[in-house]
Image (cartoon, helix red, strand yellow):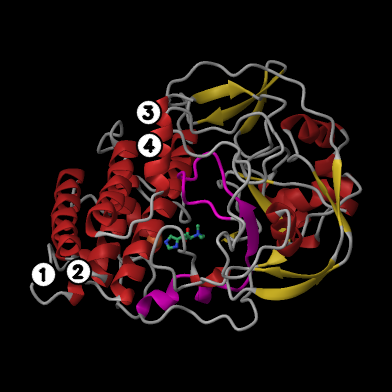
């Protein structure tokens, strides 16, 4: 690693305790969003390829609206950029009021991307001015950190949604050009034994952190005890090679491997391989953000639904870990609540967002990075869960029904956004997420 790289890594983790570093963190995150979209035309940024996905330009405006709505509007001297944007770019906040129907986000041709860029600049200037003033209460600092984490979540969504959009194009558009990956044989699957007992999970800082180091979403706590039986967890994620064995063993055709909802879903959709895979001229290929590429066998499998992950685990004579087994295994040892590293954020990382790559690498031993990992856990509140105060209480809590928790992070998760206590969540049939799995037994 070069000296310059080391310096910038330290800067990223430097505590944002004063106006200048807070402003710099805010502007750096804002700049990454625009960087990710800098090679996208107005046409690339406009369509919505399915209801669950959104246009890139909608994401760019929505994350901007978030700062305007929840921070700037509290400042009596702030002049709203355009009052119609509240209707157009509110995602789901009932507290804020009526909004544009989600399935129709791709029909919003006005404002165009030039105006959305101007909106971003306007809000950046107002936020910079506000942050330079200093003397902010805990609530504003918490909302600032929430807004930064929110924008990072949408950076991942921009890339997921763009991949889905581009995949519908007959000629396989390339978002990022990069050299071909080398083929490789995966490591043999080995297991780590973990002794159970009463263990602590979750973060003590849920919904209250005001710095990048202490921030966690409300849904990541409270820290609480759970009981785990002794278990084993795989030392690496399930690979594409493993998945090919499952396909070859008729995994998609044997009802006894599938949950009823999953069996119904694969028969309705005709799914017989992970999302974006295709078998042509005797070769398996997959659509990537660098166009269609041969499947690389030692990479972790990505773009499988919860249903497929669950069926695979049963076929393999194993199961998915619960989110608590996953967190405990990833933490390595029980951490001290309130201590210097309360959520166990140290440890190895797989691939996180590199705008020049946007794709996982060979499956290694890191639990965080490359692909999100489905767990068997339903997305539910932890004991004593309290949604954040105000309209942002709608951020996570109201979605705690009919979804499953994914842990880790992916190759398109922005660096610094990952945490061992992080709870991502999606419905069981989702697979445009960079989602894979790790076995437990
Ligand atoms: C946690 C990824 C499911 O996509 O709605 C974005 C993230 N929350 N804005 C989502 C989120 C508010 C959320 N997921
Ligand atoms: Fe959002």
On the image, numbered disc 4 is attached to which residue? 8
Instruction: Identify which residue, 76 or 106, lies in the foreground.
Output: 76
Report the Cα–Cα distance between label 2 and label 3.
Answer: 35 Å
Question: Whole-percent x and y of residue 441?
Answer: 88, 53
Q: Which label was assigned to residue 72? A: 2
**First in sequence: mark 4 or mark 1?**
4
Element under disc 1:
loop
Q: Do the residues labelled 1 and 2 touch (CB within 8 Å)?
A: yes
* Label 1 CB-ligand 2 distance < 8 A: no
Identity of the residue drawn at 48% across and 31% down: 289
**First in sequence: mark 2 or mark 3?**
3
Report the Cα–Cα distance between label 1 and label 2.
Answer: 6 Å
Q: Are marks 4 and 3 in contact (CB under 8 Å)?
A: yes
Identity of the residue drawn at 68% across and 55% down: 331
Identity of the residue drawn at 63% across and 56% down: 406
* Label 2 CB-ligand 2 distance < 8 A: no
Quadrant in the picture for residue 326: bottom right
Report the Cα–Cα distance between label 4 and label 3.
Answer: 6 Å
* Label 3 CB-ligand 1 distance < 8 A: no
Report the Cα–Cα distance between label 3 and label 1.
Answer: 39 Å
Quadrant in the picture for residue 246: top right
Element under disc 3:
helix
Q: Does the magenta stretch include residue 289?
A: no
On the image, numbered disc 3 is attached to which residue? 4
Assess disc 4: are there few (<14), some (14-19) or many (≥20) residues with their C-alpha within 10 Å of its C-alpha. few
Question: Whole-percent x and y of residue 371?
Answer: 62, 43
Q: What stretch is highlighted in magenta?
A: 391-419
Q: Is residue 404 magenta?
A: yes
């Amino acid at each position: 690693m070069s000296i310059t790289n080391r310096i910038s890594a330290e800067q990223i983790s430097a505590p944002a305790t004063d106006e200048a570093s807070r402003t710099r963190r805010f502007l750096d995150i804002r700049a990454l969003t625009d960087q990710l979209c800098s090679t996208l035309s107005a046409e690339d940024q406009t369509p919505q390829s399915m209801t669950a996905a959104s246009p890139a330009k909608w994401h760019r405006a929505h994350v901007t609206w978030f700062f305007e709505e929840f921070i700037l509007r509290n400042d009596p001297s702030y002049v709203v950029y355009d009052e119609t944007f509240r209707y157009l770019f509110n995602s789901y906040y009932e507290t804020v009021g009526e909004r544009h129907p989600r399935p129709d986000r791709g029909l919003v041709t006005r404002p165009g991307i030039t105006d959305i860029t101007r909106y971003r600049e306007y809000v950046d200037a107002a936020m910079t001015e506000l942050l330079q003033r200093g003397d902010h209460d805990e609530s504003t600092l918490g909302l600032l950190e929430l807004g930064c984490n929110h924008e990072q979540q949408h950076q991942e969504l921009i890339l997921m949604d763009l991949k889905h959009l581009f995949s519908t194009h007959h000629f396989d558009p390339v978002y990022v050009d990069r050299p071909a990956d080398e083929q490789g044989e995966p490591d043999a699957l080995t297991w780590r034994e973990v002794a159970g007992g009463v263990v602590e999970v979750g973060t003590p800082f849920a919904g209250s952190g005001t710095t990048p180091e202490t921030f966690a979403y409300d849904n990541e706590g409270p820290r609480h005890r759970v009981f785990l039986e002794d278990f084993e967890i795989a030392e690496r994620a399930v690979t594409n090679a493993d998945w090919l064995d499952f396909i070859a063993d008729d995994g998609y055709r044997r009802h006894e491997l599938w949950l009823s909802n999953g069996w119904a879903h694969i028969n309705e959709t005709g799914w017989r391989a992970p999302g974006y895979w295709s078998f042509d001229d005797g070769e398996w290929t997959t659509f990537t953000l660098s166009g269609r590429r041969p499947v690389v066998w030692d990479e972790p499998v990505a773009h499988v639904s919860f249903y497929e992950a669950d069926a695979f685990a049963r076929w393999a004579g194993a199961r998915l870990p619960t989110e608590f087994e996953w967190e405990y295994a990833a933490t390595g040892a029980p951490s001290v609540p309130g201590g210097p590293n309360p959520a166990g954020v140290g440890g190895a990382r797989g691939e996180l967002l590199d705008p020049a790559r946007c794709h996982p690498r060979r499956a290694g031993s890191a639990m965080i990075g490359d692909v999100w990992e489905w767990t068997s856990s339903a997305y539910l509140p932890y004991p004593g869960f309290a949604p954040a105060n105000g309209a942002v209480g709608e951020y996570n809590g109201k979605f705690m029904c009919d979804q499953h928790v994914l842990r880790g992070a992916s190759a398109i998760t922005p660096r610094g956004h990952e945490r061992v206590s992080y709870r991502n969540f999606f419905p069981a049939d989702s697979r445009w997420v960079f989602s894979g799995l790790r076995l437990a037994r």
